[in-house]
Every structure is written in C-alpha cells, then in structure tokens.
Image: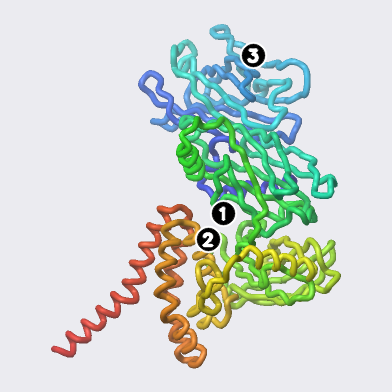
Amino acid sequence: MSTKNFFILSMMFCLLFPASSVYGHGLGIDTISSINIQEQQFSVSVEMPMIFENEQEQITLTATNNETDETAKNVTYLIGIFYQDEMILRNYFFTEDGILPIIVTPTNDGDITIVGEKDSLLGAWYGTESNPVEITGPIFNSGGLYTFEIEIRTIDEPTNIIEDSGVYTADLTIVESKSFPQKDQNNQDVEFGTKSYFDSISNFQYDSDKKEVTFEMPFDWNESKMSHVNVIHVETQFPKDFEEFLSPSYTGYVNDIKLFKSSVTVDDYTYDDDRTVHYVLLQDHLRYLKNEMRKAEQPLPDKMDFKLTASQETKFPLIAYSESEEFKVNLSWDPVNIEAGVPTNFVFTIRDSYTDSPMRLSDYTFVIIQNNEELHRVSDNAEVGGDFEKFTFSEDQTGPTIVKFENIRNTGQETEFAFVVVDKTTGEKKAAVIEQVVEEPVAAPQESSEEGGGCLIATAAYGSELAPQVQMLREIRDNQLMNTESGKSFMSGFNELYYTFSPTIADMQRESPVFKEIVKAGLTPMLSTLTIMESAETESEVLGLGLSVIALNLGMYVGLPVIGIVKLYQIKKQ
C-alpha cells in the first residue's frame, strides 16, 4: 500500500475509534496501565512503527508515574521480545528519564547485536541523546505480532533494585502483506493477497466451487489477552476483473460463526485494480464470538479461522466511503440482476459518514466504466441527498463494471462500486433457478413480495419504492429486524395488522394529493425516530432500541394528541 493510502487508513481508524482505542493492542502503541512498585503506580508504554519502511526505525519505551503524570527516573527495564512463541532478544536497558529510545536496523541474516554503553550494576545497555542504543540483526524483519515481556528492575535511584516487580506484556504488530496464488474454475491463476494488522496469516485457500476464501490467524482467546485487544483488522485482496468472485456483498465468518454485516466491508477505491474486503472486529465482536464458541462446550481454539463467501443474494444498500471518510454513499439498483438490454435504475443516497444523515443539495458526477473505458457520465445535484440514474447496457457491454461517484459536493472526493453485467441468457438462467427454488408462491399484498413485507404507505407517500425514505425503512427492516428472532416476531405480528389497512391508505394517497402530503408530514417524525435502529445489531440491541422507538412513537402519535384533546376539553369546560 502506498504511503498515501496507509495515511488514509490511519485517519479512518482515528475517526472511527477514540484515541484511547486507536493506540491499543497491535496498533502501534500498547500501554501497560497499572504496575505497582513500592506503593506507587506506574504505567509503561511501548511504541513501534506498524510498517518498517526505512533502513532504521525507532522503538520507544516510556515509564510514567500515574499519580504525578511525570516520567519516572532512573529506570532499568528487563526486556524480552518474542515472535511466534520464540524468544529473539532478552536484555537489560537503562534510562535516566524513563524514556528509552532504541534504534533498530533489521537484517535478514547474521546475529543480533546491541551497540551502546553498559552500566556496572546490572550490565544494562544505555545510550546518550546523540547516540541512542542500537540493535542490528534479524529482528522485526517479518510481519506479525511481537510480544514484549517487561520487568522494571530499578526506579527512582540507579541503585534502588526492585525484586519481584512482576512480568508484564505488551503486544505490537508489524503489518504483514502476503500473496497467495490460487486457481479459478478454469484452472487459471488468480493472485489473491492478504494484509494483516494483527498477526500472521496462513493456510489461505480459495474454493472455486463454493466461491469462498478461507485462511487462519493465531489468536489467544484468554481474557488476559483479549481485555486490551481493541480491534482486529485483516484484509483480503483480489483483482476487480475476477468475475467469478466479484459480488456486491460478502458474508464473513470466524470459527464458523457468522459476523455482523458491519464487520465485513467492501473497498474498491484503495487500489486501482484490486478489490479489498476488510474484516474489522471490535472488542465487543470478539466477546460475542467467544460467547458463541463457549456454547459448543469445547475447548477454545488458539486461532481464528476466517471464511469469506460471495453472497448469493444482493442485500441493498451497498455502502462505500470516500477516501477522506467524509462521505458515505448507499447504492441500490433495480432489477437486482443487471442484464444487458434491460433498463437499470441506480438509486443512491449521499450521506454524512459521521451522522449518517442524507446530505441535501449534493453535487455529484455519476460514471459507469467497463474495461477502463467510460460508458456513461452525467453530473447532477441530489436535492434531498438521494437520487437515481437510469442506464441500459448494450448487448456487448457485459462483464465486470464499475460505478463511480466523482467530485462529491464539489470536494474532489470520490468512491466506487463494482459489479457484473450479465447477458440476457445468463439472467434468464438465474431467474429460472430462483423459480425452481420457490416450491409454492405465497399470496401477499401487491408490492410486498419481500420477506419482511412491503412499505405500501411510505411508497405511495414518496412516489417510488426507490425513494431514499423507503430505502431507509427497508434497510432497517432487512438489516436489523429480520436478522434477529425478536425482530422477526415483531414483523410477523406487525404485518398481520399493517396489511389490514395499508392498501386502503395507499390507494387514498394516490387519489388525493392533499391526503398524500398529510401522510408524508405524519411519517416524518416516525422516520426520525427509526434512525435510532440503524445502530442495532444484536438481539438485545434490537429489543432495547425497538422498545424505545415504540415508546417515542406512542408518545408522539397517541400521547400528544390525547394531551391536546384533554386540554381542549378543559378549556371548553371552563
């Protein structure tokens, strides 16, 4: 990855997570927060570059008195460094001001040597401001997780030797990039790659029949290690023109446990020719995985087995961010299978990535690209934040395709989505397969053939199923409610009631523009409260936030009118 893209990725983490989380386990800095020495509390932080780009890099250890917030004096560290469970270095190091810089020069061969001064008490290495301690040799020359075992042997005074201060560990990562040549269905070579921001990736396999990628990474599920793991970030890359595995969305698994949708994201802008799929697992996700594994009543593994499958069904909306992470674009299209010769509606919403709110009056340029050639380009303005563009691919315009949104809000920022355009024959085959899977059609109200039902009233109010407000309702239904048991139960009961009156209300809106505007105004408060549900992923979150939304809507649509009626009655009585 270029320095520019690495900087962008770093900025993304700074924006997504608080500073205390960014500088955590495996992410450049790890801090041992509570070391008790002679009735004083100290912390030790270890800082190391995630990427060794230069011939020499610096590692820094800092000891701080937690009560005074000042660096400790006359500290002697006993430092052991481990890589893949093997000790590669163990030695004493001394610093007068608590800050120990160590210059590291990695090599691929030879012995590890230390250059500096040595004291006479413990034989600890120390340096000066102009000549810091330097370590040279085969150390930090491979990506993966490095464990620092640290003991404090002197503090405050050079002769104040500390016995049994305890052994503390800090874990830091050097980003590892690997290539894994694989075979496609036609036995042709395909270059896959991985990038790990935690530990080393191994046993990478692509199964062309199942359309899935598997690989593994060491991981310690013990609480002592997990407690300061803030995030696990792993990437998989493959060519954008690898049609066989190109899908609008993917499903991720760790140790055969399905991940939340938010944990697996598609990135088509970091590399020009490759698609990147990111796994991002926060600490809450790790605890969820651990709890799910415990249900099997089997010993916890010592690794993570990752699996990535191309989704058989396209789940809208697709999501992509601009490089600055300032803008978020949601994209859907209709019909779901994009066929040559069939008109396609591309429906999108430009959002503020921090608040997730649609950004009104958003200028954009919509571009369709195939084989590095532009097929279509149009500039427009999304007045309400959402808009749509129509395009029909000709019979010879099939295969991997990219839709780009350029110059979003006149900032020069852009993002893109990749998909495959099929010929009409292929599309008909897909439709035939779908018909064979459905054993018996289920009678349902018009426009509501989807699993969770249709949004008849909102569709009539906003004029189209493709309206951003209707898309938001469907996102919440499909991504939050229909993914949990409590949500499914609610939707089942809700639909039974909803379809007793919604077709009539929808027809009345179509017949009366005034009534349509009244309904639209009435829906606005409800839509505002429903945005609360967009952050719900687990069963408990859906239940808790769902009850809150119900309470808010009861207050607005029932409580306030009742209060108003009572007040009017009291005034009339007086």
| Residue identifier under label 3 | 117
Question: Which residue is at the front of the view, 112 or 474?
Answer: 474
Return the residue at label 2. 479
The residue depicted at 13 percent of the width and 89 percent of the height is: 574
Q: Earlier in the sequence, mark 3 or mark 2?
A: 3
Given residues 554 and 564, the one toward you in this image is: 554
Q: Residue at x 40, y 68 (%)?
A: 493
Q: How many marks?
A: 3
Image disc number at residue 472: none
Q: Reply above or below: 383 against 514.
A: above
Please give the residue where the numbered disc 1 appears in the rendered image. 261
Q: CA distance from mark 3 to mark 2?
A: 61 Å
In the rendered view, tell whether residue 194 sits above or below residue 441.
above
Q: Amino acid at mark 1?
A: Lys
Visual colour scheme = rainbow
Instruction: Give the distance between the C-alpha atoms of the residues marked 1 and 3, in whole angstroms.
Output: 54 Å
Residue 469 visible in the picture: no
Residue 426: horizontal and vertical position, in percent?
A: 77, 66
Task: Tell me the amino acid under the disc marked 2.
Answer: Asn
